[in-house]
Image (tube, rainbow, N blue to C red):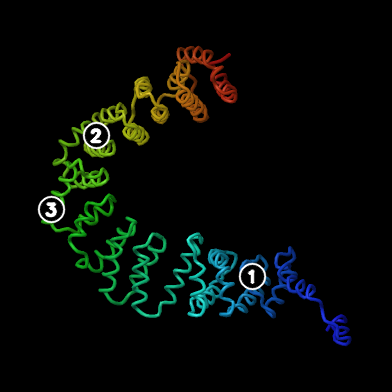
Amino acid sequence: MSFAEFMNKVLGSQPSVEAAAAAQKLPMQQLTSSSGWEREKALKTLTRAPQAAALPLLLVRVNDWVPQVRAAAREAVRALLRPADAAAWAQALPEVVALTRAGRADHAELLNEIDSFLSSPAVLPALQAAVLPDTPLTVRRHVRRLEWQAASNAADRMAWLHAALVGRDIPLAHWALSSVSSLAEAADRARLWAAAMTSPFSRIRLSALACLRKDAPEGLPSELLQDLALSAHAALRRSAWAMLPAAQQAQVKARAMARVVDASVSARHRVAALGLLAETDFECVRPLCQAWGAEPLPSVRVALLAALRAHADDAQVEALVWAAWADSAPRLQQYAARQVQQGVYLADSVRVLEQAFQHQTALALRRAREILRHGEPWAVLLLWLQAMGLSLEADREAEVADAVACWQRDMQHICMPPKPVQAQAIKAAWLQVVARLPRSLQSSLGFVLATAGVLD
């Protein structure tokens, strides 16, 4: 007993309300002290006299960098594992979730104790009431897992798994999908996997189909399997197609052909049907693919062109990419640019840029920049500098300037100087447009040209 405490006892004096409140706040303030001794002392005080308001800081100190502080914090947290403090635990859920991801030490034992406490009937309702629409997703996901841990009978667990599998939280759906395998009854597993086939996420449907194919292939209705064979998800479509018997495959092909030629069907469904036919029987859709230019919807035109490109030789592929680049739809122009990025070489850089100007859009010039990045560097620079000399609208002139800046950045990896004839043409074009370029680009590109011997 300190001298002050002895005198208070002898004289009968009591501390003021303000002094008591300050004494109560002191340990919480010491929890953030830079001194490990102070933090440990505060934690031991809070273990003897727990304060629910300190719970978030206690959970943070569980992952402290000082081992003695971590040990004291664990005991302080255990002192608050009381149903009376359920509201405080509801407010500290973000810190609980953060502790599950902490890696300074192994917190598995304490986290198991916390989860057992939070999933108890006396505490879980308070957590569920604290979950609001704006609650962080990680916190909502943790509460859902606590609900799974609290489910004591098979019916509750089945209901929880069903809700998770068809919900819009994909990590939770994946976790639920892995938990289905632990169920003892094959009929229950098949029922849940069939329910997962209605998930909004194709990855969940694909995983459920694989599980169902392995464990209970008879548990999936043939009608649903035929619908999955026409899915927009390629891997799911292939898996469902492989599970169909030959007679049903013929029925699905007939449905797919009807979708492809029906203009009233959505573009997404027509593209999916075309994908199935192109993979299983391309000859039946070859005439449609060859007439791809007559299709009014750009997304379907791309799908027809892609199917035709997959069955074409190198010479035909180059012609198809040129045709796509000449199309007025931005989606086709993007397809052409991606094909060049994947290895199709368009040697005529002048034609690429001329076609971009014919489209009369800034987006077409941006796609041209993506294509020309794979051309001969000095010839490409000359084209862009000559384009800067044209009278362009503001948005297209900005795209050309960006293309020149992009060329300058790429030039850091090029060492070969231009040919003498190229150097003269580049110098003439540079002197004509240098004043129209941003000052920073004038300096950096001018240095590159001087280094390459283009400028004196």
Give the x, y percent position of residue 133: 47, 61
Report which quarter residue 156 is drawn in.
bottom left
Residue 352 tag number = none
Residue 367 x, y percent position in the rendering: 39, 30
User: Which residue is the site of mark 3?
Assistant: 251
Question: Mark 1 and mark 3: span between their CA atoms?
Answer: 64 Å
Label whose residue precedes the other's in the sequence (2 or 3): 3
Q: Residue at x 81, y 76 (%)?
A: 16
Q: Which amino acid lies under the numbered mark 1 shown in the image of this protein?
A: Leu
Rounded to the nearest angstrom, the CA distance separating label 1 from label 2 is 64 Å
Q: Are marks 1 and 2 in contact (CB under 8 Å)?
A: no
Q: Which residue is mark 1?
A: 58
Label 3 CA crowd tier, 10 Å (few <14, some 14–19, many 20+): few
- Tag 2: residue type? Pro
Q: Position of residue 297 (x, y in %)?
A: 26, 36
Within 10 angstroms of label 1, few (less than 14), some, or many (20 or more) residues? many
Q: Nearer the viewer, residue 454 or 123?
A: 123
Point out which mark residue 296 bears.
Answer: 2
Q: Is residue 9 above or below residue 250?
A: below
Q: Position of residue 111 (x, y in %)?
A: 54, 73
